Image (cartoon, grey):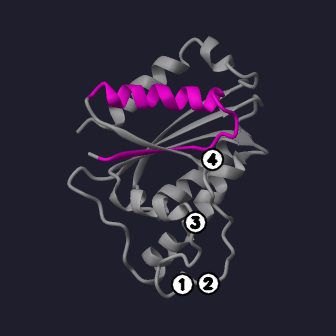
Amino acid sequence: MKTIAFCGSPRKDGNTEVLLREAVRGIQETGLNVEIFNLNSMNIMPCQDCGGCNESGECICRDDMDQVYDAIRTADRIILSSPIFFFSVSAQAKAMIDRCQSFWCEKYLLKKPVLAGKSGRKGLLLLVGGMKKDIGIQCAEACAKAFFRTISVPEHSTLHYLGIDEKGAIIRHPTALIETYEAGKKLVEG
């Protein structure tokens, strides 16, 4: 079972990355590997809305998204982790999501969705925000839901933690680390 994970945080060793590590640890302890993409360190240009993928389902821009496309096509489990910035996922996560317009074209215009392997396709969304209002979670999850649907991940779970702003604050949360660890393990079960 192939699992990939996207870290959408620009903050090295920040709350989002700490949560992602716990989910990955839960998966690795089942004996599986996880390929992690640190989106902040990748060369991913924004979608140019050029229409280049409309007829082929393939983006004509060449950058680090080429690695991401290949990984998404062959993954059984996909994790997206992001801080909440201005009621949405981070710019790093959003740039990657927007570049998945080629999958949208492939699925909806060309009628060739990404096919599930024998293990099916499932996702996990991890969100951390400093604000205490649910609107950030709702908006970020709507964006992630569209992403998962576009790349043919019909089912995903979401864990979110609000009021977590200071670097390292997630470690002091009473349940976040264990919940995320358990969510990682559950993601790769059956």
Read off the residue under disc 1: 54
Does residue 78 belong to the magenta stretch?
no
In the displayed image of the protein, which residue is found farthest to the bottom?
Answer: 55
Question: Decide: marks 2, 1 in contact (CB < 8 A)?
Answer: yes
Q: Is residue 69 left or right of residue 168?
A: left
Q: Residue 52: give x, y in percent of width and height.
A: 58, 84
Q: Which label sits in the foreground, 4 or 2? A: 4
Does residue 29 belong to the magenta stretch?
yes
Read off the residue under disc 2: 51
Q: Residue 79: give x, y in percent of width and height.
A: 47, 43
Q: Quadrant of residue 87?
A: top right
| Relative vertical location of residue 140 with respect to residue 133 in this rendering, above or below | below
Question: Decide: marks 3, 2 in contact (CB < 8 A)?
Answer: no
Tag on residue 63? 3
Viewer-proximal residue, 142 or 37?
37
CA separation in Å, label 4 and label 2 = 27 Å
Viewer-proximal residue, 98 or 64?
64
Q: Amino acid at mark 1?
A: Asn
Quadrant position of the C terminus in the picture: top left
CA separation in Å, label 3 and label 2 = 17 Å
CA separation in Å, label 2 and label 1 = 5 Å
Viewer-proximal residue, 97 or 147?
97
Q: Which label sits in the foreground, 4 or 1? A: 4
Tag on residue 41? 4
CA separation in Å, label 4 and label 1 = 28 Å
Q: Earlier in the sequence, mark 3 or mark 4?
A: 4
- Dot 2 falls on a residue whose secondary structure is loop
The residue at the point 48 percent across, 70 percent down is 103
Q: Which residues are magenta?
A: 2-30
Q: Amino acid at mark 4?
A: Ser
Question: Decide: marks 4, 1 in contact (CB < 8 A)?
Answer: no
Q: Amino acid at mark 3?
A: Asp
